[in-house]
Image (tube, rainbow, N blue to C red):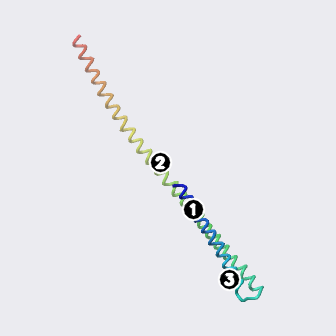
Amino acid sequence: MSDENSEDKGTKKGFLIGMLVGGVVGAITALLYAPKPGKELRRDIKNRTGELMENAEDFIDSTKTKATDMINEGKRRSDNIIAEAKRKSASILGDAEKIISGVKNKFDQSDSKSRQSQTKKS
C-alpha cells in the first residue's frame, strides 16, 4: 500500500512540475508571438516570469504548510491510538490478573479442603 501511495505522490509531483513548466513556456511563447517592440517584449517576459515565480513560491509555501499540518495530524492520531491501546492493554491485564487470582484462590481453597479431609481420615 505504501508503494501505491509513493507512486501517487510521485505522479502528483510530476504533474505539478509539468504544469509549472508548461505555464512558463506557454506564457513566454504567447509573449514572443505578440506584436510588440523588443524592449516592451523583454519587460513583459520579465514581469510575467516574476509573477509566475511568485505564484510558484506561494504554491510551494501552501504545500509545505499543508504537509506540515498533515504530519502533525498524523502524529496526533498515532499518539491517540497508542494511548488507547495502552489503556485497553492495561484493562485486559487487570482482568487477566483478577481471573488468575480467582483461580488461584479456588485452587488454594480446594487444596486446603483436601488436606483437611485427609487429616480427618488419618
Residue located 36% across and 38% down the image:
95
Inspect the image, locate mark 2, and give the three-letter code of the amino acid beneath it: Ile
Which of marks 1 and 2 precedes in the sequence?
A: 1
Which residue sits at x=22%, y=12%? 121
* Residue position marked by numbered label 2 in the rendering: 82
Which element is circle 1 on? Answer: helix
Q: Which mark is residue 85?
A: none
Instruction: Locate residue 100: give its quadrant.
Output: top left
Question: Do the CB atoms of the residues marked 1 and 3 lie less than 8 Å apart?
Answer: no
Mark 2 or mark 3, earlier in chain: 3
Question: Could you tell me residue 24's position as x and y percent?
Answer: 67, 75
Disc on the earlier residue, 1 or 3 = 1
Residue under numbered circle 3: 30
Q: Position of residue 16 (x, y in %)?
A: 61, 69
Report the side of 77 relative to 7 (left or right).
Answer: left
Vertical side of 39 occupied by 85: above or below:
above
Residue contact between numbered discs 2 and 3, judged by CB atoms under 8 Å: no
SS type, badge 2 = helix
- Verify CB contact (< 8 Å) between mark 2 and mark 1: no
Q: What is the crowding at mark 1: few (fewer than 14 residues within 10 Å), some, or many (at least 20)?
A: few
Which sits in the foreground, 76 or 57? 57
**Residue type highlighted by circle 1:** Lys
Q: CA distance from mark 2 to mark 1?
A: 27 Å
The amino acid pointed to by label 3 is Ala
Q: For residue 9, which numbered disc appears in the image?
A: 1
Residue 19: x and y in percent read 62, 72
Residue under the image location 31 percent in, 31 percent down: 102
Judge by depth and name the residue closer to the eye, 53 or 94. 53
Q: Is residue 28 left or right of residue 98?
A: right
Q: Nearer the viewer, residue 109 or 15?
A: 15
